[in-house]
Image: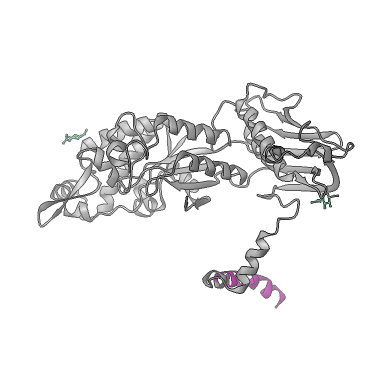
Amino acid sequence: MAVMSVRLLPVLCLALLSLRGSAAYDPDDIALLQAAQVPSPYGSLWPLPQAVQISPDVYYIPPGEFSIVHGAGSTAGPTCVVLEKAFQRYYDYMFGYEQRDGRDVDASAPSSGRLLQLEVVITSKENECHKYPHINSDESYKLIIDDSGAVLQASQVWGALRGLETFSQLVYRDSTGAFTVNKTHIADAPRFSHRGVLLDTSRHFLPLKTIFLNLEAMSFNKMNVFHWHIVDDQSFPYQSALFPELSNKGAYHPFTHVYTPVDVRMVIEYARHRGIRVVPEFDSPGHTSSWGKGQKDLLTPCYTDGQPSGTYGPINPILNSSYCFMDELFQEISLVFADQYIHLGGDEVDVSCWKSNPDITKFMSEHGFGTDYRKLESLYVQRILDIVTKYKKGYMVWQEVFDNHDQVCSCGIVRVALLCFSILAYVILNY
Ligand SMILES: *[C@@H]1O[C@H](CO)[C@@H](O)[C@H](O)[C@H]1NC(C)=O
Ligand SMILES: *[C@@H]1O[C@H](CO)[C@@H](O)[C@H](O)[C@H]1NC(C)=O
């Protein structure tokens, strides 16, 4: 009986949770919201590191005298821009705002038990100061704050970035207003190597500053993949060097609602400084209405009663010109985006337009596809995979590609699927 109830507990909790979800603003919800407004107690680190020991001994930090520095023996130094910038940024997150309010915060720190430095030591020769984060980046770190000082140790810069975030979460102001940090030992490493957020900049154009703000919020939460769903049916804001007409005609506005090559570089660099990968998604053959505006004959003409209806469907999979175009576009994308992976979409292909088109019907019968349009889709997807592979990129696709196309699955793609299934948060923005 006891065993039984223990096993039932999670089920009950789930049931209660789903009840909660359906009731709109009942009194319990309001109480919960109010509770959420009370600041978390000190030591409520987010996300919770793997091993945390916090003691009641405290050190006072006089911001005017405190600095974050490269520690003795670190393989990184002043030329490591990622760390230099992170030192400044985290100093500002911790003390910048208070400094500006004009109060003499240093005076409130007692003169004994002071902490004046955080030493950051990178231990690996391959510190990756000048690299991009990748799927196998080492994000582990150790943080020790005790009588001999504060030392943050990481094998590579990526772990140091996560450790700086943890250190900033540990600093608080005591009842007298003095900046304080407890004696602490932390050893941490992420449980999942892909911790992503997807932003859609096609349905709703997001200005650069909004993307930056999101990347910053991601770094506060130690997330490390920005899945940039950059184009879709609604608009094509990516400004291509090879095919400028795509955004000239396909963006909501050709100048104000586009991401220029410089913008894209800035996003990638801003993300790199926070240990975040940028994985672009160029979804095809469906979700491409906006592509057709700037690239003639790319989309399939749809027919009604044997006549072209003037509307268009997915990318035309029977024309060589479609693949020439995709080849050149993906060559550019492979160079512009540094990450090892590109997301190729592949979801929600509406085959009704293909069914209406007599040329496609002829192609289907010539290739012995019968009426199985999944075979046509597979042919398209396979050719796109081949193109991306040629440019030495790995790829991700949506679940449907696996559901519809078992012949497409190779060992490589199955491995990538595991990435897709890991955390993806859909952020709906209202700015
Ligand atoms: C930090 O130190 C203060 C002061 O001794 C103590 O009250 C608090 O419980 C400590 N925090 C944690 C999480 O141990
Ligand atoms: C398309 O390319 C294939 C193979 O490269 C070739 O056999 C075929 O004739 C081409 N089709 C057209 C319409 O050019």
Picture quarter containing residue 126? top right
Residue 278 in percent (x, y) is at 48, 38
Magenta: main secondary structure equals: helix
Q: Nearer the viewer, residue 364 or 330?
A: 330
Compared to residue 167, the image places residue 45 above or below, namely: below
Q: Is residue 337 magenta?
A: no
Of all residues, the one furthest to the right in this rendering is 112
Apparent side of residue 178 relative to residue 158 in the rendered image (left or right): right
Of all residues, the one furthest to the bottom in this rendering is 1
Q: Is residue 4 magenta?
A: yes
Name the quarter showing ligand 2: top left
Q: How is the image coloured?
A: one colour
Apparent side of residue 256 relative to residue 105 in the rendered image (left or right): left
Residue 164 in percent (x, y) is at 68, 38
The quarter of the rendered structure image containing the N terminus is bottom right
Residue ID at (27%, 39%): 249
Q: Where are the magenta residues, as a range?
A: 1-18
Residue 370 in view, yes or no = no
Compared to residue 50, the image places residue 324 above or below, namely: above
Of all residues, the one furthest to the top in this rendering is 79
Of all residues, the one furthest to the front in this rendering is 102
Residue 431 in view, yes or no = yes
Picture quarter containing residue 4? bottom right
| Total count of labels | 0
Residue ID at (60%, 69%): 29
Residue ID at (82%, 50%): 175
Residue ID at (75%, 24%): 73
Residue 32 in percent (x, y) is at 64, 66
Picture quarter containing residue 391? top left
Residue 373 in percent (x, y) is at 25, 53
